Image (cartoon, grey):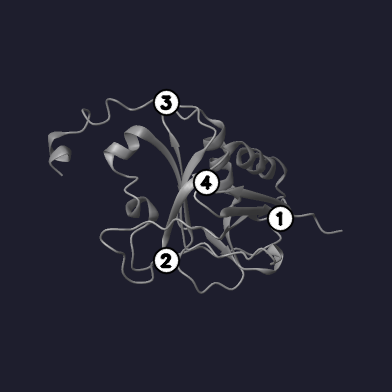
Amino acid sequence: MPTPTHVLLAPVREGGALVFTHAHDSGISVWMRGLTRSVDESPRPRGVAAPLYGGTLHDLEPLRDFVTDFVEHAVDDPAVRLSPGRIRDTRPIVTRTSSDSVSSRMHFSHRAMSPLDTAGPWDGAAAELLLARVRGQQFRHMGFFATGLPELPADAAPDAMPAAVINRERAEYLAEYLQAPAGQVLHNLRRDRSPEARRG
């Protein structure tokens, strides 16, 4: 008897949603559905870079429960063959979003999955997902950036579509990130940098 597929539709405040599914097997599949807020990048990426989308997930609690459920019940023998993602000719999502800057790391905690594994035929850009939480606040909402995720139409069956996949190891790290406090603002991060780093 096939394992039932669990589905989480995570609404995005700016419009659209991220869709997550799992069946306690290879990983958590993720798609986008009707995202409306694309991010203007400067300089514009070249090569095979996909558009960058950003926004706010209304509530991190359902995603936290969904990822925890997968991690706690995942089977040892994956049912789906995953292919490692590969970023070509462009910067990874952390750089494209400036999440690696000092000012960003002072005020936000991040979990970047770059690139994601894939399942099924894949001819697009590397799928990448970055989640961000505001330090010093226990907000229920959470920011995200996404690029290269496939679009999942409302009438499509997820099991029949190519998918970006958060593998089991990454799902474990993601569960830890979602369960941990967002942490305090890192006031000392800037002053701890060396003069050489500050000049850079």
Q: Nearer the viewer, mark 3 or mark 1?
A: 3
Q: Secondary structure at mark 2?
A: loop
Instruction: State the CA–CA distance, disc 2 to disc 3.
Output: 32 Å
**What's the CA distance linking mark 4 and mark 2?**
22 Å
Q: Is residue 113 visible?
A: no
Task: Mark 4 or mark 2: name the one nearer the start of the chain.
Answer: 4
Looking at the image, residue 6 lies above or below residue 182: below
> Between disc 2 and disc 1, whose residue precedes?
2
Q: CA distance from mark 3 to mark 1?
A: 40 Å
Q: Label 2 amino acid?
A: Ala
- Local crowd size for mark 2, using a 10 Å CA cut-off: few (<14), some (14–19), many (≥20): some
Q: Secondary structure at mark 4?
A: loop
Question: Camera-side residue: 50 or 112?
Answer: 50
**Label 1 sits on residue:** 77
Q: Which mark sits nearer the N-terminus, 4 or 1?
A: 4
Q: CA distance from mark 4 to mark 1?
A: 37 Å
- Rendering coords of residue 196 (x, y %): 13, 39
Q: Nearer the viewer, mark 4 or mark 2?
A: 4
Q: CA distance from mark 2 to mark 1?
A: 32 Å
Where is residue 4? Give x, y as percent. 79, 54
Q: Which residue is mark 3?
A: 136
Query: Where the C terminus falls, by quadrant?
Result: top left
Query: Which dot, 4 or 1, sits closer to the camera?
Result: 4
Q: Are marks 4 and 1 in contact (CB under 8 Å)?
A: no
Q: Is residue 123 above or below residue 76?
A: below
* Mark earlier in primary sequence (2, 3): 2
Amino acid type, mark 1? Asp
Tell me the quarter of the picture where residue 58 sits: top right
